[in-house]
Image: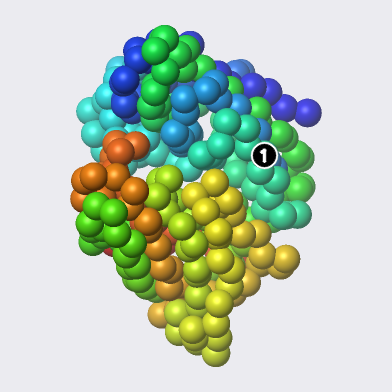
Amino acid sequence: MGFQVRNQGTPIMPGQDVEYCEVAQLPGTSDDTYYVTGFETKMTGGSHHLIVAAVAEGSEGGLTVGDRYNCVGPSLPGGGDALIAVTGAQQPYSEETYPQGIGRVYHGGQYIIMNYHYLNTSDAAVDARMAVNFHLGAEADIEHIAGSIGFYNFAISTPPGESASFTKSCTFSEDAMVFQLTRHTHQWGTDFPVRYKGGAKDGELIYTSPDYEDTDHNFAEPILVKAGEGFEWTCNYQNTTNSVLRFGIKASDEMCILFGQLYDPETLLPTDQGCN
């Protein structure tokens, strides 16, 4: 049981490397509450990423379904941070299912920001279309609301024709249960190891993502990360271009990010963790 939200489509011309935000809307009215236990996403060819966020109640002013504007990551036209995570993907097709008891909660009529990045390397226009399926459960299914991790390393620079490695760590400001970690680099990213930072397992390897298309690590059981503990990740690159690769928003740039999902072990309230 569930529903689908999709964008209205826009042509991406040959050679364009562009990022847009487009406004969509969940079906139903504010009386409808959706308890979401998973997502599916699908994008047409040429996609670099899709990140979907919901607009917080009371921040909808001026939004119209179908509005499209340039952006960097999901954002509102007038700025502000009144956005709630939904889902994201780097692959043309992606499927995400939450562990039992974990989910996200949205409401009918809620506005959605679909942030998509396309690079058209062909000699013909590409129709940028994407759809998100929301898989629903019952209210009784949800014991914890998922929150997000966003750990960034902006200090990366790989000379042309060379390899380089960059390591960073971030720690949590409060206790949280983590159930998924996700790397984000572009095509020049090679292996991407993630380790525990602090605590009894300090320095222990959690997983290594072999390349930029193999991104996710799902823990067999959610793990407790205490305040002051966190994760260390290393971005390795092989620069096959004639330019220096630095952190940037274009597909011709690079990124070094550790994303993840977590929940508050004590309450039903969502929690987020981030540093840069």
Q: Locate the C terminus by quadrant.
A: bottom left
Q: Is residue 75 above or below residue 65?
A: below
Quick check: can you spot residue 58? Answer: no
Q: Residue at x 75, y 39 (%)?
A: 137
Q: Residue at x 48, y 42 (%)?
A: 85
Percent of width and height locating residue 182: 52, 55
Label 1 neighbourhood size at 10 Å, few (<14), some (14-19), many (20+)? Answer: some
Q: Residue at x 62, y 32 (%)?
A: 93
Q: Nearer the viewer, residue 87 or 239?
A: 239
The colour scheme is rainbow
Q: Is residue 228 above or below residue 103?
A: below
Q: Nearer the viewer, residue 131 or 93?
A: 93
Percent of width and height locating residue 61: 32, 22
**Residue at the bottom extreme, as displayed:** 200
Picture quadrant of residue 151: bottom left
Q: Is residue 63 above or below residue 227?
A: above
Percent of width and height locating residue 92: 57, 31
In the picture of the structure, the residue carrying the numbered disc 1 is: 95
Three-letter code for the amino acid on which mark 1 is drawn? Glu
Quick check: can you spot residue 84? Answer: yes
